[in-house]
């Protein structure tokens, strides 16, 4: 009798493990598809940025050296040279620190301190 109960529990456990494994595989496939979509969007954005930069160069006389210099300035503006610009909170008139992505102070409701358009996205 004990053996039958154990076999039934073992079968149930195997079925549960199988269901979990199936769900995990489905989630992994969804994650792979999402990653592929992000990679395609990133490649499109890189191409669009390059096209815009080339148009700017052709019409304004800017050079790659100008872009590299400005990129370096922005990179260092957050205190770290790591290839990205960290968005920092800014002080509000009420004294609270306001996340740069917010449009209003979360404490007093005042318009958020000045920030660049790119800090808001």
Image (spheres, rainbow, N blue to C red):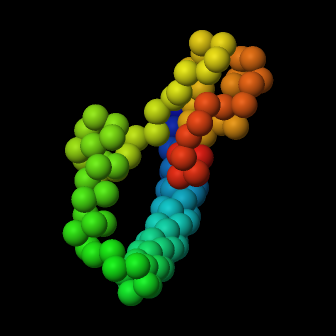
The residue depicted at 34 percent of the width and 37 percent of the height is: 78
Residue 75 rendering spot, x and y as whole percentages: 30, 48
Q: Quadrant of residue 53?
A: bottom left
| Image coords of residue 107 (percent x, y) | 71, 17
The residue lying toward the viewer, choosing from 62 and 44, is 62
Q: Nearer the viewer, residue 79 or 45?
A: 79
Query: Is 68 on the left-hand or right-hand side of 120?
Result: left
The N terminus - image quarter? top right
Residue 46 position within the rendered picture, expressed as x and y whole percent measured from the top left: 41, 75
Q: Is residue 15 visible?
A: no
Instruction: Please name the residue shown 40% across and 79% down the image.
Output: 60
Pick the front one: 93 or 44: 93
Q: Count the marks: how many?
A: 0
Q: Is residue 13 visible?
A: yes
Who's the residue at 69% across and 25% down the image? 105
Q: Residue furthest top?
A: 95
Instruction: Place residue 101 in its image quadrant.
Output: top right
Q: Residue at x 50, y 62 (%)?
A: 31
Q: Nearer the viewer, residue 37 or 91?
A: 91
Q: Is residue 101 above or below residue 105?
A: below
* Position of 103 relative to 15 (above/below): above
Left or right of 44? Residue 4 is right
């Amino acid at each position: 009798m004990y053996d039958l109960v154990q076999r039934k529990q073992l079968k149930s456990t195997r079925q549960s493990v199988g269901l979990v494994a199936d769900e995990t595989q489905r989630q992994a496939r969804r994650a792979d598809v999402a990653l592929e979509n992000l990679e395609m969007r990133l490649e499109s954005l890189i191409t669009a940025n390059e096209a815009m930069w080339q148009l700017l160069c052709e019409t304004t006389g800017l050079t790659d050296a100008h872009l590299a210099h400005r990129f370096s300035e922005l990179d260092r503006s957050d205190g770290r040279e790591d290839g990205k610009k960290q968005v920092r909170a800014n002080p509000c008139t009420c004294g609270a620190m306001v996340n740069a992505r917010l449009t209003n102070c979360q404490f007093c409701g005042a318009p958020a301190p000045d920030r660049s358009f790119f800090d808001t996205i």
